[in-house]
Image (cartoon, rainbow, N blue to C red):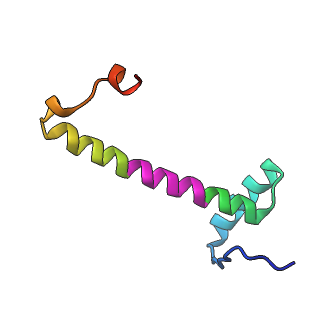
């Protein structure tokens, strides 16, 4: 069945393949869907790390006068 979604071919070490296969079996999902979900989670984790680094830089800048309080943000 043709699809317009981009495809990706990935080569895994046998031990990593076995882990992904075990997760797939435990979740009752297709191997490709499991791999997609794991990649998505990894991308979100990396994105979160970038946001943490940004927040730390802002906190270290010492310019607290320009920050909004929690209450001000939710008004």
Of residues 13 and 54, the one drawn nearer to the viewer in this rendering? 54
Q: Establish if 37 lies above or below 55.
A: below
- The residue shown at (21%, 45%) is 57
- The residue shown at (34%, 44%) is 52
Give the left or right position of residue 15, taking residue 64 as reference.
right
Q: Does the magenta stretch include residue 47?
A: yes
Which quadrant is the C terminus positioned in? Answer: top left
The percent coordinates of residue 20 (x first, y second) are: 69, 60
The percent coordinates of residue 16 (x first, y second) are: 63, 65
Instruction: Give the image quarter of residue 19.
Output: bottom right
Of residues 38 and 23, the one drawn nearer to the viewer in this rendering? 38
The percent coordinates of residue 22 (x first, y second) are: 75, 55
Which quadrant is the N terminus positioned in? Answer: bottom right
Magenta residues span 39-49
Q: In the displayed image of the protein, which residue is found farthest to the front?
A: 75
The percent coordinates of residue 44 (x first, y second) are: 51, 52
Give the left or right position of residue 54, taking residue 16 as reference.
left
- The residue shown at (81%, 55%) is 29
Of residues 43 and 5, the one drawn nearer to the viewer in this rendering? 5
Q: In the displayed image of the protein, which residue is found farthest to the top?
A: 71
């Amino acid at each position: 069945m043709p699809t317009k979604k981009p495809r990706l071919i990935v080569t895994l070490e046998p031990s990593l393949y076995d882990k992904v296969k075990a997760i797939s079996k435990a979740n009752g999902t297709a191997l490709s869907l499991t791999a997609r979900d794991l990649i998505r989670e990894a991308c979100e984790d990396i994105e979160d790390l970038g946001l943490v680094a940004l927040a730390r830089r802002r906190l270290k800048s010492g310019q607290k006068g320009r920050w909004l309080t929690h209450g001000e943000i939710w008004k």
